[in-house]
Image (cartoon, rainbow, N blue to C red):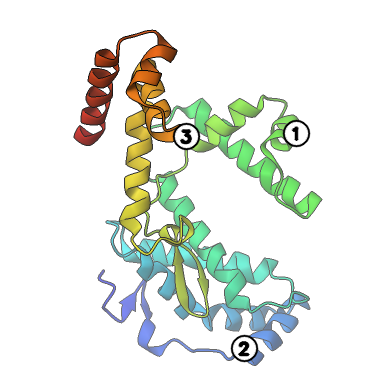
């Protein structure tokens, strides 16, 4: 199913109803009072919101119908868990919920293979995190999650990272005033995004240098020492410093 079609998951997207903020607020109040018809109308009235989120994942090879249905689960969770006392728009709360549900689906269906025991530990940790968040009214720390589970902090972090899907720099993470916010938007404010990408590559390249070469580069370019001064400090000749310095720079440029 293609995203530019009006039919998706057996729903004619061209006929989807769009609710106003006032209508959404009124339906939320009725839903919280147990009105099932209001709940259904609220869900149907926000299917376009699900569609807008799913379209952001169009670069992936996943079936559009599947992603739309998974997104609807996120919408339903948002409807059931939204606090009408909050002074925020429903869409502001719902979009991250929908994105989270889609990302969870993609993570569970990715091609990376993780051992069953590691996956079970990760899901236990995620369930524990959610339970603690509800109890503490805030996100729990890894230490709190580990203590609740009776395992080490390291085990919790490794398990949760093992089932986490690698993120694209252009993965949507939130929406504000109808504008998508992507991972790349959170990584820096440089006008040229290549600047911080180059910096990451540079740091990784330097990190792989032998200890002596890193020492020479630090003294030469961070501390402003001359080759003669560096040679005296580390006990080698100036010619050796020059050779090691050039070798280190050549390695960095090569990478």
Place residue 59 in its image quadrant.
Answer: bottom left
Placement of 37 over or under 212, stated as above or below = below
Sequence-wise, which precedes: disc 1 or disc 3?
A: 1
Q: Nearer the viewer, residue 63 or 177?
A: 177
Q: Name the residue: 38% across, 29% down.
A: 220
Pointer 1: residues within 10 angstroms few (<14), some, or many (20+)? few
Q: Nearer the viewer, residue 109 or 234?
A: 234
Q: Name the residue: 41% across, 21% down.
A: 215
Q: Name the residue: 69% across, 70% down.
A: 82
Task: State how far apart marks 1 and 3 are (Cα).
Answer: 20 Å
Q: Nearer the viewer, residue 191 or 149?
A: 191
Q: Which mark is residue 21?
A: 2
**Residue 88 image position (x, y, % from top left):** 68, 77
Task: State how far apart marks 1 and 2 are (Cα).
Answer: 40 Å
Cβ–Cβ below 8 Å for labels 3 and 2?
no
Reading the image, the residue beneath label 1 is 148
**Residue 126 image position (x, y, % from top left):** 61, 42
Pointer 3: residues within 10 angstroms few (<14), some, or many (20+)? some
Task: State how far apart marks 3 and 2 are (Cα).
Answer: 40 Å
Reading the image, the residue beneath label 3 is 162
Asked whether the viewer can see residue 112, the reply is no
**Residue 222 image position (x, y, % from top left):** 43, 34
- Quarter of the picture containing the C terminus is top left
Q: For this view, does 141 lie left or right of residue 13? A: right
Cβ–Cβ below 8 Å for labels 1 and 2?
no
Q: For this view, does 31 lie left or right of residue 252? A: right
């Amino acid at each position: 199913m293609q995203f530019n079609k009006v039919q998706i998951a057996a729903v004619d997207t061209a006929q989807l109803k769009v609710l106003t903020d006032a209508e959404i607020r009124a339906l939320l109040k009725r839903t919280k009072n147990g009105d099932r018809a209001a709940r259904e109308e609220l869900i149907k009235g926000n299917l376009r919101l699900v569609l807008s989120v799913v379209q952001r994942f169009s670069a992936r090879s996943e079936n559009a119908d599947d992603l739309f249905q998974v997104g609807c689960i996120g919408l339903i969770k948002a409807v059931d868990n939204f606090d009408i006392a909050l002074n925020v728009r429903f869409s502001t709360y719902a979009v991250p919920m929908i994105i989270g549900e889609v990302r969870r689906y993609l993570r569970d269906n990715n091609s990376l293979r993780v051992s069953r025991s590691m996956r079970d530990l990760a899901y236990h940790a995620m369930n524990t995190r959610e339970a603690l968040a509800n109890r503490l009214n805030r996100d729990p720390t890894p230490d709190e999650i580990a203590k609740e589970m009776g395992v080490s902090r390291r085990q919790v972090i490794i398990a949760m990272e093992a089932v986490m899907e690698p993120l694209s720099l252009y993965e949507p993470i939130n929406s504000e005033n109808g504008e998508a916010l992507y991972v790349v938007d959170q990584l820096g404010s440089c006008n040229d995004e290549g600047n911080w990408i180059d910096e990451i590559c540079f740091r990784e390249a330097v990190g792989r240098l032998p200890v002596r070469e890193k020492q020479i580069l630090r003294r030469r370019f961070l501390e402003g020492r001359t080759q003669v001064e560096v040679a005296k400090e580390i006990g080698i000749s100036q010619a050796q410093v020059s050779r090691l310095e050039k070798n280190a720079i050549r390695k960095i440029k090569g990478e």
